Image: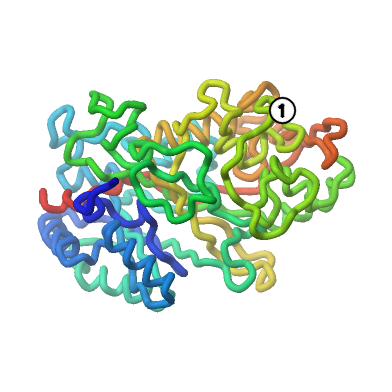
Amino acid sequence: MVSDKDLLDIQGDIWPGLPKEFETFYLFQIKKDKVSDFKSKLKAMADDHTITSAKDAQSKRQAKKDKKDPGVGINIAFSSKGMDELGWGRGTLKRGETLKDRSWDVGMKTDMLDQGRDDAQDWTTPDGIHGVFLICGSKAQVEEGVKLIESRLKDAITHLDSMTGNVRPGDCRGYEHFGFKDTISQPAMDDFPNSKPEDSLPYKCAPGRIIVNRAGMMGTDHRTRLWEPEWATNGSYFVLRKMKQLVKEFHEYSKKEAKSVGMTPEELEARFVGRWKSGAPLEKYPKEDPGPGHSGNNWMYEPWNKEVKCPFASHIRKCNPRNTNPNAPTSDESLIMRRGIPYGPECGENADAERGLLFGCYQSSIMNGFMLIQNRWIYNDAFPAAKAGQDAIAGQDIKGAATEEDKMLSINLYGPDGNEKKSLRFPSFVKIRGGEYFFTPPISFFDKF
């Protein structure tokens, strides 16, 4: 079992996750003439537990469960530019002592514009980000957390931008803006306590898939040259991505096209996602939504090479193919720890306002985690099977297409009774507004300042 020493070293949003009703991602730059000042002040924040450890986060989550005030939770992560500014980049450290992930090194904007389908015209995230503070709690606590950071670091950093989201209210709690129950399929890491075994996948996740230099990293339990430098142990790479959801367009499209494939709008949207709105998986409940309480994860696709019940291109099958992946039928290689939160007003308040998801995820390698899922699986028409189509929820318009029609994506559909297969073409329902790759260091890293 993971030790208390490690739990005091791992930042709390990596595991078990910071309790949050609201969350602000506070993007900043370190002032060039204040690097030493920043380091000393940040170390003090780590020493007095302003930076929330996994151990502290466990206590906060228990307090919330007991209907007590958990207080604010704060974590910090750095871009490659930020680590350079701190003197922990390639220009300062010796070979073998620097972080190795290529995607993190070049940054999200370069990475996703070159290899992905992001459109630079949609981006609103500023350039030159050095780091991000994650501030979680109630609305008032998050606001106080921002003031706390600014009061303690005001002379050492420049605030660039903030992204703020909140858990949706009332009956929509736990649901994203398309209307589906979210953050269901989280990996349960070996040697870490699991509070919801009923929601766990039927195979375990090696902790090294999420946390740097722990068992299972890069497929091995022992240090190799592919592991990160020793100082990075217990850290994790963090992906932050602002995804605008075209909610009105999504539902209008479903109403318009459902009849053409012999379905109701609800049945069609469920096939786009791979789950009913309650979270119940199509693989287990192909005919109708059984309602809340059936969103467990202890199941596989049967048979693994058929899509009669759940389309290959459905969101959950593209992002986690389980035993459909022909190369690794029971592998944890793609597992990431997701930490998304919705942003924007409720649809009933202003249907035309921007809303979406502040997507976040942790992994020990961006190239083997987020990038593999996004570019090799979501966008790949031949994954997990030939002519599978493309992710109906996270897919983006095909770049370089000659016509608007050529930009369209496709999915194969069977009716609730497994009747005749039909192919449906659809536009993208998301736009990427920006983001960045970060490294969330272990708390012991601040002692090295």
Q: Residue at x 37, y 46 (%)?
A: 238
Q: Nearer the viewer, residue 4 or 129?
A: 4
Percent position of residue 254, x then y? 79, 50
Visible residue check, residue 122: no
Visible residue check, residue 376: yes
Rendering quarter of residue 90: top left
Percent position of residue 323, x then y? 58, 29
In this image, 60 relative to 316: left or right?
A: left
Percent position of residue 161, x then y? 38, 61
Q: How many marks?
A: 1
* Residue that numbered label 1 is attached to: 306
Q: Is residue 195 positioned above or below 325 on the image?
A: below
In this image, 237 relative to 431: left or right?
A: left
Q: Amino acid at mark 1?
A: Lys
Q: Residue at x 61, y 28 (%)?
A: 324
Percent position of residue 139, x then y? 43, 75
Rendering quarter of residue 162: bottom left
Q: Nearer the viewer, residue 393 or 37?
A: 393
Secondary structure type for disc 1: loop
Q: Pointer 1: residues within 10 angstroms few (<14), some, or many (20+)?
A: few
Q: Is residue 266 positioned above or below 73 on the image?
A: above
Q: Residue at x 63, y 69 (%)?
A: 346
